[in-house]
Amino acid sequence: AQTIRQLHPQIFEWLSLHDMNVIIIIILMVLVSGITMISTLLILILEKTNMIGTLKALGTKNSSIRKVFIYNAVYIIGRGMIWGNAIAIGLSLLQLKFGIFKLNQESYYVSEVPVNLDLTHYLLINFGTLIACTLMLIIPSFIITKISPVKAIRFD
């Protein structure tokens, strides 16, 4: 008796290549979203430089100001994740029900793109993305400690 892996090793090699592609795509998406969030945080800091100077002049700790900006950035990340999940789940459900995205069966062994809606995968990817993006924001938030209250209040 032979297993299906022994009977059709080419198919399983092809599938393992696609698993690696998925991992690479997810890593690239997390990096792009992290870089976008870093630039968003820097823009928020530049827009609020005057406020940061005023808060520092009033005696607010740098860590407290940094927390405000990180919480604001996490809120923005969360909103983006909610919209992204809604679109992804919506497209996945449409594909499951109607098979919108077709494939050449001779090349891919299936007639339409297969979809697997797994709550665990969604939760793990969302949690990992949130943690990775938040960790990427910690270093740029230290720019707040370099802002001088006097120069920041004069900043336009």
Image (tube, helix red, strand yellow):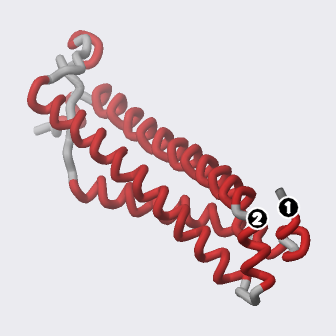
Q: Is residue 106 visible?
A: yes
How far from the left and from the top, in percent, is residue 66?
A: 66, 75
| Residue bearing mark 2 | 49
Residue displayed at 40% across by 54% down: 79
How far from the left and from the top, in percent, is residue 88?
A: 29, 40
Q: Is residue 62 left or right of residue 93?
A: right
Q: Crowdedness of circle 1 by 10 Å Cα count: few (<14), some, many (20+)? A: some
| Residue toward you, 120 or 98 | 98
Q: Is mark 2 on a helix, strand or loop?
A: helix
Residue displayed at 45% across by 36% down: 21
Residue type at tag 2: Thr
Q: Crowdedness of circle 2 by 10 Å Cα count: few (<14), some, many (20+)? A: many
Task: State the image quarter where residue 16 is shown.
Answer: top left
Give yes or no for contact between labels 2 and 1 (Cβ–Cβ under 8 Å): yes
> Which quarter of the figure is the N terminus placed in?
top left
Task: State the image quarter where residue 126 is shown.
Answer: bottom left
How far from the left and from the top, in percent, is residue 64?
A: 64, 82
Q: Is mark 1 on a helix, strand or loop?
A: loop
Which of the labelled discs sits on residue 19, or is there none? none
Nearest to N terminus: mark 2 or mark 1:
2
| Residue bearing mark 1 | 155
